[in-house]
Image (cartoon, rainbow, N blue to C red):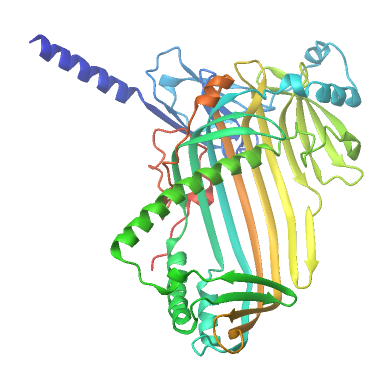
Amino acid sequence: MKQVYITIFVCFLSLNTVFSQKIISAKVIDSTTKEPIPFATISYNKKSGVISSEAGDFTINIDTITSEKDSLFISCLGYNQKSYAINNFSETAIELSTEDIELDEVVLLNKQYTIDEILEKVKDSLEINYDTDFVQQRIFLRTSDYTNVLDKKVKLKESTIPEINQQFTDSIVNAIPKKSSYHTEVLGDYYLKMEEDNQLAKLDIIKASELYDKNNQLSFEGVEDKLQKIMRKHVKRDSYFKIKSGIIGAKSEIDSSFFEDEAMDTIVENKLKKEKKKKENFLKYRSSYLSSLLKKNFIYEDSDLNFIHKSRKYDFTLEGLVYLQTDLVYKIRFEPDGGADFKGVMYVNADDFAVVRLDYENVKPLKKINLFGVSYLNYLQRGTFLYEKNSRGKYSLKYLEEANAEKVGFDRPLSIIEKNKNVKGRRKQNEVATHVNFTLQNSIKNELVIFESTPIDKEIFEKIEIEPTMIPTYLPNYDPSFWEGYNIIAPNEAIKKFKSVEE
């Protein structure tokens, strides 16, 4: 009988834990304009929390048993903070009102600083204010990549291979989709020490997904299979390709396995190798991608966002004071003066002179090339950095958003020449000569949120060993259940509406 009571008690505790889990979703909006408020902080008992998306949406998972004392806090720069009892929360739209600064509150500041004095204090306090020591962070990174093919024309001028004709060339070109998008999301634990020249970092991926239309890939693979059969028929062993575009040339060897049919055991072995390699590459690429994002931080002297270290290139305007929760912050606008690339707004804590938020965008193309039929234009880079204090009492990154866009063009002759030094007679075997006219427009948006930031020491960091065990789960359509139980950034409209085209 005692065993029965114990079993019932354990079941009761399990059920209580399950039912204590709360999933809260709502939208944060301006009480006056009714417009969504992006980058609002939604925190549970002012500890763990999430950031509202660009549309003001958020979802927060609370996996602990809640009581009447537990609260949800919603705050954003320039707005009055709101709080709700967790157990009574039923809002679908949270309205925040703007916060006015009273004159007597401004007088409480130790001194009325000039803009030059504020900037000097910001620069002098960089090393003191920002945490660059070893830390463990729970991160969520979303990258959305959009490609738009503006022009895609290939004119066949000469071909010594009968099957490679204009009709076949057109089929290859038509297999390339005019518009495509690829979204990847990664949740993981990130161990790092922030250093400008030698950033130490290790990424342990917990869960990952990739959202794209596989049908586009499959249609192109069909053309690729057909091309391989043609090449096997006409290309000789020990051959190599030379790819020429005017004066530009490159040599490419052909692997002998190209001509052979694989045995079943070899296929299985190669599949396992590819699986392992894919895991290694995914971990390596996501880790280096994170590092490259963080190295853009304005606290580094060599960063493109050099408005602090190279302030002479900018004009600054002090626009007043606003509230960030209970802290007064200076709102400072900057414009380029003397060749700088960016404009924006930074918000500086009036007490310790830390930049707690930065909004920026470029004012001119960042890179422009047009030479011999090859063109490149990097015409957009804008973003937002948000910081908050951690348990060390120093500021660390809470949220990063970045958007980049570029345009690439190629309008040149292109020849693929097969050569073979082991065949008697002339070395040149086959040639396919074309004129290629391609123009691509590509844009990438990154969103990085850091939910937890825990200081660690060097010894713990050095003992951490990461095994590449994760590959992203392919999602043909947006699936809201994939991230159930995890705190992430609410998906944007493009992700919500994403749907693979049916074959």
* In this rendering, position of residue 61 left or right of residue 121: left
For the residue pair 291 and 57, the one nearer the viewer reads as 291
Residue 414 higher or lower than 132, as above or below: below
- Residue found 14% across the figure and 12% down from its top: 5
* In this rendering, position of residue 251 left or right of residue 140: right
| Residue 455 visible in this rendered orientation of the protein | no
For the residue pair 250 and 139, the one nearer the viewer reads as 250
Q: Give the percent coordinates (x, y) of residue 444.
A: 62, 52
For the residue pair 355 and 466, the one nearer the viewer reads as 466
* In this rendering, position of residue 64 left or right of residue 305: left
Residue 337 higher or lower than 392, as above or below: below
* In this rendering, position of residue 167 left or right of residue 474: right
How many callouts does the rendering have?
Answer: 0
Q: Give the percent coordinates (x, y) of residue 323.
A: 71, 22
Q: Give the percent coordinates (x, y) of residue 347.
A: 75, 28
- Residue found 46% across the figure and 15% down from its top: 70
Q: Give the percent coordinates (x, y) of residue 446.
A: 60, 44
Quarter of the image containing the C terminus?
A: bottom left
Q: Residue furthest left?
A: 1
Residue 204 higher or lower than 69, as above or below: below
Residue 422 higher or lower than 282, as above or below: below
Q: Quadrant of residue 69?
A: top left
Q: Quadrant of residue 442?
A: bottom right
| Residue 419 visible in this rendered orientation of the protein | yes
Quarter of the image containing the N terminus?
A: top left
- Residue found 61% across the figure and 48% down from its top: 445
